[in-house]
Amino acid sequence: MTQNSLKEMAQTRRAKFGTFLVEFNTPGIGQIMKAAGCEYVLLDMEHSGFNFESLKSMLRYMQSADLPTIVRVPSRNYHHIARALDMGAEGLMLPMVGSGEEAAQIAAHAKYPSQGHRGVALGVAHDRYQPGPVLKKLRDANKRSTIFAQIETPEGVANADDIAAVKGIDCLWVGHFDLSASMGIAGQFDHPDFIAAVERVGKACRKHKKSFGRLVPDVATGVAIYRDGFDFICYSGDVWIFQAALKEGMDQLRAQTKGGRGKKR
């Protein structure tokens, strides 16, 4: 493992800052995000157009920048978990985890025997195409893979303690939009019921010494949730950061040139 591995990050409660990648697939994107100060990137396959072919290239872009990558796979199905890991994902995020049983199955899908039942493929992307002793490769892969379980439903909140207790689950991640929507209070993140739900998940993380993560739209929200106990803080995403910066520049140019109207001749 490198000094900045996701596994090492998940074993501390210090703040870790990254961003969300949902749109931009270009060879320089990992270097750009690393130069901006990102410690990790969350690459989305649930709501984006990224497929496994694009994922394979994008993981190489991140490796070239030494930027740890969490891949949110489309489902909890074995073939999504195993393929993402075989392609070199260091971390996996699983949506809509609702029970300890589901979390245990996810962990088993992601780990090689004797910790799980992941199918063995060696000398491929996840071990950088290198030869080596088989047992050591399996042990190293099991140590390296880092699992983020998304809590996005009242069921997940109710079972947060059971989910956090599962060996192999490293972080509980609040999917704030889905959670609020499933509670019937979509987008009301200051609602007492939503606040209580998040506190319950955080309590489970503290009890079982697991990391606690969330996506935030702005700096103020990131600071606020850090004070509430979150340590994996994912700041906005490629689309929204680019759009906001571009809009600010366009608005200022128009304002300072009076809308771009030329002088009368």
Image (cartoon, rainbow, N blue to C red):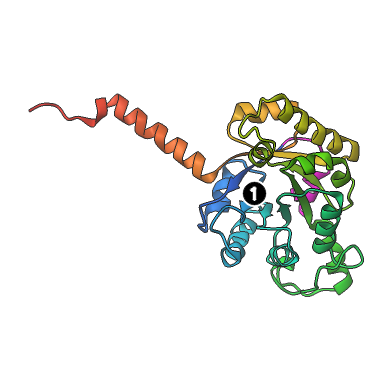
| In magenta segment, residue 98 | no
Whether residue 48 is visible to the viewer of this picture, yes or no, is yes
| Residue type for callout 1 | Leu
Where residue 208 appears, x then y in whole percent? 90, 40
Residue occupying the far front of the picture? 184
Where residue 125 appears, x then y in whole percent? 69, 69
The residue that mark 1 highlights is 42
What secondary structure prevails in the magenta region?
Answer: loop
The boundaries of the magenta stretch are 1-15
Q: Quadrant location of residue 134?
A: bottom right
Circle 1 sits in a helix, a strand or a loop, which is it?
strand
Q: Is residue 10 above or below residue 259?
A: below
The front one of 261 and 186 is 186
Q: Residue at x 80, y 50 (%)?
A: 7
- Quarter the N terminus occupies: bottom right
Where residue 241 appears, x then y in whole percent? 51, 39
The front one of 9 and 173 is 173
Where residue 56 appears, x then y in whole percent? 61, 65
Give the total number of marks visible in the rendering: 1
- Quarter the C terminus occupies: top left
